[in-house]
């Protein structure tokens, strides 16, 4: 299955791996001390783009939160048609079997090197 790099990059956004877990019930100050980004500090557009991460946002490391936020900002800068394509690719990826996903990741890694 040959997939162009243009398709692979948006699909790999779906492969998000959580960072270090935070203790439950931590406050905003504690999050800031650990370098984390409080959900409430994200713009409404960023929150909408990252909505699937909302319930576990505080468990991600600050670095992981920053990566996700940067990805959301890049996504928000895309023209509307390109956003629709990304969403379609995301749905296609979601519907793939684990084996298809594994092969896709391997192909992407080969193309990157």
Image: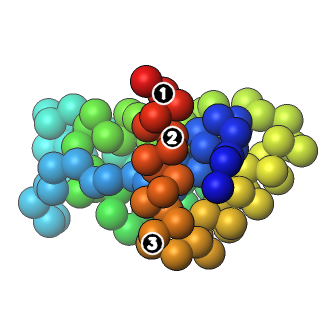
What residue did someone put label 1 on? 112
What residue did someone put label 2 on? 108
Mark sitting on residue 64? none
**What is the C-alpha distance between the residues marked 3 and 2?**
15 Å
**Is residue 82 shown left or right of residue 59?**
right
Q: In the rendered view, would you say 40 is above or below 111? A: below
Other-residue count near label 3 (Cα within 10 Å), few / some / many at <14 / 14–19 / ≥20: few
Q: Position of residue 74 (x, y in %)?
A: 63, 31
Is there a contact, CB below 8 Å, between mark 3 and mark 2?
A: no
| Residue 113 figure quarter | top left
Q: In the rendered view, would you say 91 is above or below 74? A: below
Residue at (77%, 34%) from the top-left corner?
A: 78
Task: Say how many tags the image has.
Answer: 3
What residue did someone put label 3 on? 98
Residue 42 shows up from this direction:
no
Is there a contact, CB below 8 Å, between mark 3 and mark 1?
A: no
SS class, disc 3: helix
Is there a contact, CB below 8 Å, between mark 1 and mark 2?
A: yes
**What is the C-alpha distance between the residues marked 1 and 2?**
6 Å
Residue 104 shows up from this direction:
yes
Q: Position of residue 60 (x, y in %)?
A: 26, 50
SS class, disc 1: helix
**What is the C-alpha distance between the residues marked 3 and 1?**
21 Å
Residue at (16%, 50%) from the top-left corner?
A: 20
Residue that extends furthest to the left in the rendered view of this protein: 23
């Amino acid at each position: 299955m040959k997939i162009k790099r243009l398709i692979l990059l948006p699909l790999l956004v779906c492969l998000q791996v959580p960072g270090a877990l935070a203790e439950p019930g931590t406050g905003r100050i504690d999050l800031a001390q650990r370098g984390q980004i409080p959900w409430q500090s994200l713009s409404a557009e960023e929150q909408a783009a990252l909505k699937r991460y909302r319930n576990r946002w505080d468990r991600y490391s600050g670095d992981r939160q920053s990566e996700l936020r940067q990805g959301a900002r890049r996504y928000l800068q895309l023209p509307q048609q390109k956003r629709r394509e990304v969403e379609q690719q995301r749905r296609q990826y979601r519907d793939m079997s684990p084996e298809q996903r594994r092969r896709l990741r391997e192909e992407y890694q080969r193309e990157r090197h």
